[in-house]
C-alpha cells in the first residue's frame, strides 16, 4: 500500500520555507542614508546603538560630500553637508558625549563657500575663506580636506594672477592625493597644476603635470578629464617645440576621446590647435583642413568664440595660400559672428 503522507509533509515544509523567505524584511538602510532621506531622528537612533556609530555616520556623509565636490555637484554637496549638520545637532541633543566634533564639517562648509565665491568671480573673498578652511584642515589633520582646499585655493590664486603661489598650493594638493593613493583627485589636481604652470609659461613642467593627469584619470576611469589633459599635453608640447610632430599625436588622441564622449566644443578645439600647430611648419593647406574640420563641432556646440577664432585663422591660412575668395568668405563670417546682430550660429 502506497502512502502519500511524506509527499504532503515535504510540500508543506517547502511552502513554509517559501513563505518565510517572502516575509523577510529588506535590510534597514545605514544611518547616513537615513540622513539623506531626511529621517534624521531615525538616523541618530540607529547610529547611537554602536560606540562609534555617530562618528562613522558623519564620516560617510563627509566622504559623500567630498565626492560630490570633486564631481562639481555643488548643490548636492551643500545638501549633504546640511544633512550632516542636522545629524550633529540631533546627536548633541540626545547624547552630547557621543556627538562627534564639528570641525571637519565646518572646514568643508568653508571650502564650499570659497568654491562658490570663486565661481562668482569673487576671487579675493574666495582666497580669504579658503585660507580659513585650510587652517581648519591642518588643525584637525584631515588630509583629504587639506588637499581639496589647497586645490581650490591654487585655482583661485591662478585666476588672481598669483602664479607662483598657485603652483605651490596645487603641487601640495597633488602630493597629498598621490600619497593617499587617491588617483581620481590626484588626476584632477595635476590637471589644475598643469594649467597654472602653463599660465606661468613653464611649459615642460606643465606637460609633465598634464601627462600624470591623463594617466591617473585613465586609471580612474575619468575619460573626460583624461581627454582634456591630452589636449593640454599637445598644447604644452607645441609651446616647447612648434615644429615637432609630437603635439599632433596628443591632440589626435584627445580628439578621438572627445568624439566618443560627444563633447563637440572640445572636439572643435582639438582640430583648431592641430591646425594652429601645423601652420608653424608652413603647411598652410593642411592647417586649413584642420581649421575647417573645427567648424562642424563648433557650430554644433554653438561655440561663438571657437567659431570666431577659427574663421580668423582660416582668413590667415587662405591669405597665405593666395585664395582670395575663401579669404573674403571667412572674413565675412568672422565679422558676422562678432557683431551683435549677427551673433547667431548657423
Image (tube, rainbow, N blue to C red):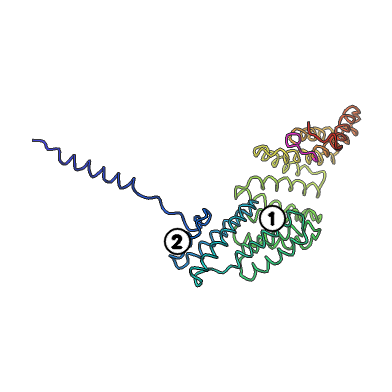
> Image quarter for residue 117?
bottom right
Q: Earlier in the sequence, mark 2 or mark 1?
A: 2
In this rendering, position of residue 13 left or right of residue 97: left
Task: In the rendered view, tell whether residue 310 sits above or below residue 176.
Answer: above
Depth-wise, is mark 2 or mark 1 nearer the camera? 2
- Classify residue 156 by image quadrant: bottom right
Q: Which residues are magenta?
A: 298-305
Residue 283, visible in the rendered structure: no
Question: 58 or 289, which lies in front?
Answer: 58
Name the residue: 71% across, 66% down: 131
In the structure shown, which secondary structural element does the residue marked by tag 2 occupy?
helix
Query: Circle 2 sits on which residue?
Result: 46
Q: Position of residue 24 (x, y in %)?
A: 35, 49
Q: Which mark is residue 190?
A: 1
Which of these two is toward me, 178 or 139? 139
125 vs 68, nearest the viewer:
125
Where is residue 80 drawn, in percent x and y?
A: 58, 56
Q: Residues within 10 Å of mark 1 (few under 14, many from 20)?
A: many
Residue beneath the point at 57% across and 56% down: 64
Check residue 41 in the rendering and tell me which mark sits there, or answer none.
none
**Secondary structure predominantly adopted by residues drawn in magenta:** helix
Whether 299 is among the magenta residues is yes
Q: Is residue 67 magenta?
A: no
In the rendered structure, the answer to whether residue 281 lies left or right of residue 102 reads right
Q: Position of residue 168 (x, y in %)?
A: 74, 63
Amino acid at each position: 500500500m502506497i502512502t502519500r503522507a511524506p509527499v504532503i509533509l515535504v510540500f508543506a515544509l517547502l511552502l513554509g520555507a517559501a513563505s518565510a523567505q517572502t516575509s523577510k524584511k529588506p535590510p534597514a538602510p545605514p544611518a547616513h542614508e537615513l540622513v539623506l532621506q531626511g529621517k534624521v531622528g531615525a538616523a541618530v537612533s540607529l547610529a547611537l546603538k554602536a560606540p562609534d556609530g555617530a562618528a562613522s555616520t558623519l564620516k560617510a556623509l563627509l566622504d559623500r560630500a567630498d565626492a560630490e565636490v570633486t564631481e562639481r555637484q555643488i548643490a548636492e554637496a551643500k545638501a549633504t553637508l546640511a544633512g550632516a549638520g542636522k545629524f550633529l545637532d540631533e546627536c548633541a541633543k540626545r547624547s552630547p558625549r557621543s556627538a562627534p566634533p564639528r570641525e571637519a564639517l565646518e572646514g568643508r562648509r568653508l571650502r564650499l563657500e570659497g568654491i562658490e565665491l570663486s565661481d562668482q568671480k569673487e576671487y579675493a573673498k574666495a582666497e580669504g575663506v579658503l585660507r580659513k578652511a585650510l587652517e581648519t584642515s591642518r588643525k584637525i589633520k584631515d588630509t583629504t580636506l587639506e588637499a581639496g582646499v589647497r586645490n581650490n585655493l591654487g585655482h583661485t590664486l591662478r585666476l588672481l594672477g598669483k602664479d607662483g603661489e598657485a603652483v605651490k598650493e596645487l603641487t601640495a594638493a597633488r602630493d597629498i592625493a598621490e600619497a593617499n593613493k587617491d588617483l581620481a583627485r590626484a588626476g584632477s589636481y595635476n590637471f589644475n597644476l598643469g594649467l597654472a604652470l602653463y599660465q606661468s609659461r613653464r611649459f615642460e613642467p606643465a606637460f609633465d603635470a598634464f601627462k600624470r593627469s591623463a594617466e591617473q584619470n585613465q586609471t580612474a576611469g575619468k575619460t573626460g578629464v583624461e581627454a582634456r589633459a591630452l589636449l593640454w599635453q599637445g598644447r604644452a608640447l607645441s609651446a616647447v617645440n612648434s615644429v615637432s610632430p609630437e603635439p599632433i599625436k596628443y591632440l589626435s588622441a584627445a580628439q578621438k576621446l572627445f568624439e566618443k564622449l560627444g563633447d563637440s566644443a572640445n572636439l572643435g578645439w582639438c582640430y583648431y590647435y592641430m591646425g594652429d600647430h601645423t601652420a608653424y611648419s608652413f603647411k598652410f593647406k593642411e592647417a586649413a583642413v584642420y581649421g575647417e574640420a573645427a567648424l562642424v563641432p563648433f557650430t554644433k556646440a554653438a561655440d561663438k568664440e571657437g567659431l570666431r577664432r577659427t574663421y580668423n585663422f582660416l582668413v590667415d591660412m587662405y591669405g597665405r595660400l593666395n585664395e582670395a575668395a575663401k579669404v573674403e568668405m571667412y572674413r565675412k563670417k568672422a565679422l558676422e559672428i562678432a557683431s551683435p546682430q549677427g551673433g547667431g550660429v548657423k
